[in-house]
Image: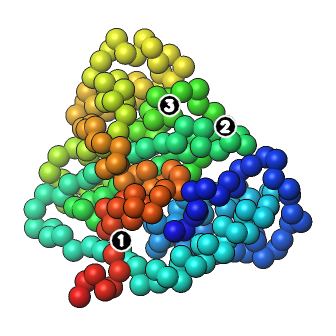
Amino acid sequence: MPLNPKLKLDDPLAEELPDAKWYHEFVGQITNLTKTRADIIVASTQLSEGLQRQTAAHYEACRDLLIYLRDTADLGQLYGQPYDEPLRVDAYADSEFGGNRRTGRAIGGNVIKVQGGLVSRKGKHQQAVTRSTNEAETIAFTDAATAAIKIDNYLTDMGMETALPPMIHVDNANVVRSCQNVALALATRHYLQSHHWGRQQYREGRIKVQQVPSEDNMADINTKPLARGKFEKHRKAMGMVSKSELK
């Protein structure tokens, strides 16, 4: 596993260790590696938080990540679905409310696929502290929808035909209802901008929204460390496979 779910990197009471130059260099290299290894985004994000304050847990996380990378060196991103039909854009969005105990900010994540192939993924702290799970989920949905619409526009500009408006998959029922229900907007005044933007895109037919079970929302892999079974399920859903699986 790239990051142990039981390891607390944001413990404000943990003893701070002297700032280490090697740690900064390590985090920089891991950040670059996320361009080709979508499965280590959470590890990269949480280790980056330690650039200002390192503890023994950060050093342990570095060791675990190196072991994981050594053991999964043959993992790669699989593409290959046929392109002789209209392309389909799918986005998955999720968040971890209060994901950072030190700052209180939620962690938002998304995964975007075109014709089943991964083209974009994101996992980072949301800019402001959110006051509810629904608010954090709405912001994550808005980020994913924005990215999906841009990708859909890029495909259109290149002369490629897309089958449907981008489908945004979320596991929060309130996000789906908020796109369809005006009355629900009255209960979301503290994050109306994100709500109204998403609702407008939905009403104009620029996106579609679908609720999926939490266990099938692959964006969860970009919001927090997961147990092995769930992590490997989402990693495979993103299209990451080992060379041995292709034989």
Q: Which mark is residue 133?
A: 3
Query: Mark 2 and mark 3: span between their CA atoms?
Result: 12 Å
Q: Is residue 109 left or right of residue 89?
A: right
Residue at 45 percent across and 56 percent down: it is 221
Amino acid type assigned to the residue bearing label 1 in the image: Met
Amino acid type assigned to the residue bearing label 3 in the image: Thr
Q: Is residue 91 above or below residue 85?
A: above
Q: Position of residue 62 (x, y in %)?
A: 67, 71
| Residue carrying label 2 | 104
Q: Position of residue 140 (x, y in %)?
A: 46, 40
Q: Camera-side residue: 153 or 6?
A: 6
Query: Mark 1 and mark 2: span between their CA atoms?
Result: 31 Å
Contact, mark 1 vs mark 2 (Cβ under 8 Å):
no
Residue at 35 percent across and 43 percent down: it is 214
Sequence order check, earlier mark of 2 and 3: 2
Amino acid type assigned to the residue bearing label 2 in the image: Gly
Mark 2 residue crowding within 10 angstroms, few (<14) / some (14–19) / many (20+): some
Mark 3 residue crowding within 10 angstroms, few (<14) / some (14–19) / many (20+): some
Residue at 28 percent across and 65 percent down: it is 117
Q: Is residue 119 left or right of residue 163?
A: right
Q: Is residue 195 above or below residue 139?
A: above
Instruction: Specify whether residue 157 is in view.
Output: no
Q: Position of residue 225 (x, y in %)?
A: 53, 56
Callout 2 secondary element: loop
Q: Which mark is residue 240?
A: 1
Sequence order check, earlier mark of 1 and 3: 3
Instruction: Specify whether residue 38 is in view.
Output: yes
Q: Is residue 28 left or right of residue 179?
A: right
Contact, mark 1 vs mark 3 (Cβ under 8 Å):
no
